[in-house]
Image (cartoon, grey):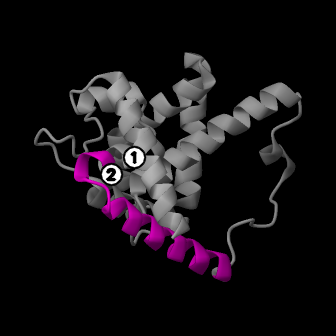
Amino acid sequence: MRPLARHTGRGQTDNSPEIAGLISRTALRDRPAFARLYEMTSPKLFAVALRILKNRAEAEDALQEIYVKVWNRADRFAGGGSSPVGWLIAIARNHAIDILRARRSGHDDIEDHGELADRGPSPEASAVAASERQRLDDCLGRLDGPKAESVRGAYLEGYSYQELAERYAIPLNTMRTWLRRSLMKLKECLEE
């Protein structure tokens, strides 16, 4: 199984365009594209589920449910400026958190109770979100390259501080400092 590739500063490249294309083809019910999407992204999404659920068997079950959601919601992926890996990670993360909540509350899974109205954003909310995304991208552009990539890795792609420290070959505390200072700069920029 080929792992998810991304720019690491060591010659690897990001395969987000390929993943975005696979999601688009999955929206058209292209089973080979969906199989390839699973092959390329399942290790990362499994890691996200395992990190949240802390139970391998539960994470394996969750992974299957996550890909059912990806299959059913692929047509909702906006593409454009959004990260396909971030979109997939958000689905995995939200699903794993839903499992934790159901475990704590002792209630039935809401999906067992039929279809609910779509709670997706309205067109107005989507426009506001796109504007905010542009502001955030502009502010991220003001950070130097590795620090901006670290912020994206930690907060959009789900990497741990340790994974990022290893990627940039720096001590863990230095990575924490990078991220803390970068977030402070982003906050200042967004408040301007």
Q: Viewed as shown, does residue 2 lie left or right of 50? A: left
Judge whether 75 appears above or below 105 on screen: below
Q: Position of residue 138 (x, y in %)?
A: 38, 69
Quarter holding residue 106:
top right
Tell me the residue that label 1 is attached to: 151
Three-letter residue code for mark 1 = Val
Q: Nearer the viewer, residue 111 or 101?
A: 101
Can residue 151 be found in the magenta stretch? no
**What secondary structure is found at the residue carrying circle 1?**
helix
For disc 2, the neighbor class at 10 Å (few under 14, some 14 to 19, many from 20) is many
**What secondary structure is found at the residue carrying circle 2?**
helix
| Magenta stretch, residue numbers | 124-147
Q: Position of residue 180 (x, y in %)?
A: 45, 40
Judge whether 144 appears above or below 158 on screen: below
Q: Nearer the viewer, residue 76 or 149?
A: 149
Cα distance, mark 1 to mark 2? 5 Å
Label 1 with label 2: CB-CB less than 8 Å: yes
> Is residue 78 visible from the viewing direction of this image?
no
Judge whether 184 appears above or below 3 on screen: below
Q: Nearer the viewer, residue 123 or 129?
A: 129
Can residue 127 be found in the magenta stretch? yes
Give the numbered dot on residue 51: none
Three-letter residue code for mark 2 = Ala
Q: Position of residue 164 (x, y in %)?
A: 33, 33
Tell me the residue that label 2 is attached to: 148
Q: Residue at x 28, y 61 (%)?
A: 17
Q: Residue at x 53, y 54 (%)?
A: 71
Q: Nearer the viewer, residue 191 or 164?
A: 191
| Main SS, magenta residues | helix
